[in-house]
């Protein structure tokens, strides 16, 4: 138990197709009992999106992941953890010894967000062993989404149960926000325009699918992914982010938004330096080999499919393909196999964690007009 902090790091990276992986239950490993589920969640995200703060909500979720990953690097323990981006929040799994330090980081981040983004976060943890006492499971496998992107695939209703308990039990700390320690958000970037679908006739789909029975999830999600592959094509073919549609936002307003999210204070030097770098970036990506290589890898390193017990995906497709998907999902829902939420929109948005511009960068994708948050609204209405 004490030496399982490398549990996730030591998992085998699976390169077989996702449809096959989901059908092989033995390839998923039970998360150790002395690990914890940690959640950060933007409160009233639906209202925030309605009020025009969708980019801020998305960036806040990304920032939480960046704060945690930067802290883990500074701890120098070789620790790798599974994490899941949810559009309006994030979920982490981590061992007991790292829990307090990560919660302290996220508590400071909560104050940072409240002060600088005018958004409220819920932050908390729940022991995996308590999840198991409720006869719920959390099983993880590592999946190579592409050559450079490996993601966790989680089956079981345990993560969602823990998330619901954390939100329900959350009590806001009375700590003075002025005493909060600055959070390391190095690598946070959000300088891209809204990204149109690869082809003019396509739209962007944000999809949430939940199978509420632990023992059935693998087979049900296998069926859903298989159908998505059949309708929209392979993961690469339905990827909402394409190199040709990427455009940098060169306005000072966009840099100012990143400044607020990252530093939480005004810095003329930061503003001008990063504005000039962004302007240079336009030529860097167009004429320099390293820039062109970075641009090509963005699509490959875009996080547009996630399974954390619920299947979440951002897909590009035609209206006919979307209609075919809805017919299929309605049939599964009528059989009580799933509950789903879907949101169709015109573009994607993307916030980024850039450690270096070769292979260490990841891009968190959501749809415009609420994206996952709007799909979740439909989902929650069905569960009432």
Image: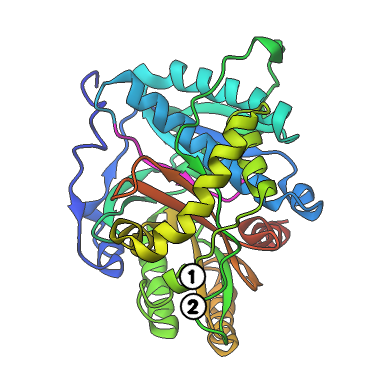
Q: Residue at x 44, y 43 (%)?
A: 353
Q: Name the residue under label 2.
A: 198
Q: Look at the image and tell me in which quarter the C terminus lies.
A: bottom right
Q: Does the magenta stretch include residue 81?
A: yes
Closer to the camera in the image, 307 or 62: 62
Up the image or down, 269 lies above or below 3; here it is: below
Q: Residue 236 falls in which quadrant of the image?
A: bottom left
Q: Is residue 19 left or right of residue 214?
A: left
- Which residues, given as a range, are shown in magenta? 80-88
Residue density around tag 2, few if under 14, some if 14–19, many if 20 or more, within 10 Å = many
Helix, strand or loop under label 2: loop
Q: Is residue 267 visible?
A: yes
Q: Is the magenta stretch mostly helix, strand or loop?
A: loop
Inspect this view and state whether residue 300 appears. no
Which residue is label 1 attached to?
240
Q: In this view, does 211 lie above or below 166?
A: below
Image quadrant in which the N terminus is located: top left
**In x, y percent, where is residue 259?**
62, 36
The reply, left or right, for residue 27 in relation to residue 106 is left
196 displayed left or right of 100: right
Q: Which of marks 1 and 2 is in front?
A: 2
Q: In which image quadrant can residue 324 be found? A: bottom right
Residue 197 drawn at (x, y percent): 54, 75
Which residue is rendered at x = 71% and y = 46% of the image? 45
Whichever of labels 1 and 2 marks the residue nearer the N terminus, that label is 2
For the view shown, which residue lies furthest in the right direction? 51
């Amino acid at each position: 138990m004490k030496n399982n902090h490398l549990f996730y790091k030591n998992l085998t990276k699976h390169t077989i197709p996702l449809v096959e992986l989901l059908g092989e239950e033995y390839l998923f490993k039970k998360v150790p009992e002395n690990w914890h589920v940690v959640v950060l969640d933007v409160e009233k995200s639906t209202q925030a999106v309605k009020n025009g703060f969708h980019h801020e909500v998305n960036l806040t979720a990304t920032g939480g992941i960046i704060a945690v990953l930067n802290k883990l690097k500074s701890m120098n323990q070789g620790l790798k953890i599974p994490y899941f981006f949810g559009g309006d929040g994030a979920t982490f799994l981590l061992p007991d010894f790292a829990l307090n330090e990560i919660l302290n980081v996220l508590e400071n981040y909560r104050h940072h967000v409240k002060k600088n983004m005018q958004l409220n976060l819920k932050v908390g943890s729940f022991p995996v062993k308590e999840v198991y006492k409720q006869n719920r499971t959390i099983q993880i496998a590592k999946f190579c989404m592409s050559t450079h992107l490996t993601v966790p695939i989680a089956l079981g209703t345990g993560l969602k149960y823990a998330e619901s308990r954390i939100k329900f039990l959350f009590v806001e700390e009375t700590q003075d926000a002025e005493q909060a320690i600055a959070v390391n958000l190095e690598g946070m970037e959000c300088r891209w325009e809204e990204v149109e679908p690869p082809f003019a006739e396509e739209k962007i789909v944000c999809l949430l699918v939940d199978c509420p029975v632990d023992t059935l999830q693998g087979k049900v999600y296998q069926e859903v992914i298989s159908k998505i592959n059949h309708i929209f094509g392979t993961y690469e073919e339905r990827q909402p982010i394409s190199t040709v549609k990427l455009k940098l936002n060169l306005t000072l307003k966009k840099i100012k938004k990143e400044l607020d999210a990252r530093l939480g204070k005004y810095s003329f030097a930061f503003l001008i330096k990063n504005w000039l770098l962004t302007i240079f970036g336009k030529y860097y990506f167009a004429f320099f080999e390293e820039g062109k290589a970075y641009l090509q890898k963005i699509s490959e390193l875009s996080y547009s499919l996630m399974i954390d017990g619920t299947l979440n995906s951002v897909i590009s497709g035609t209206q006919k393909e979307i209609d075919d998907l809805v017919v299929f999902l309605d049939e599964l829902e009528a059989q009580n196999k799933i509950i789903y939420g879907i949101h169709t929109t015109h573009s994607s948005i993307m916030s980024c964690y850039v450690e270096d511009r070769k292979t260490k960068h990841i891009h968190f994708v959501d749809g415009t007009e609420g994206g996952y948050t709007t799909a979740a609204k439909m989902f929650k209405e069905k569960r009432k």
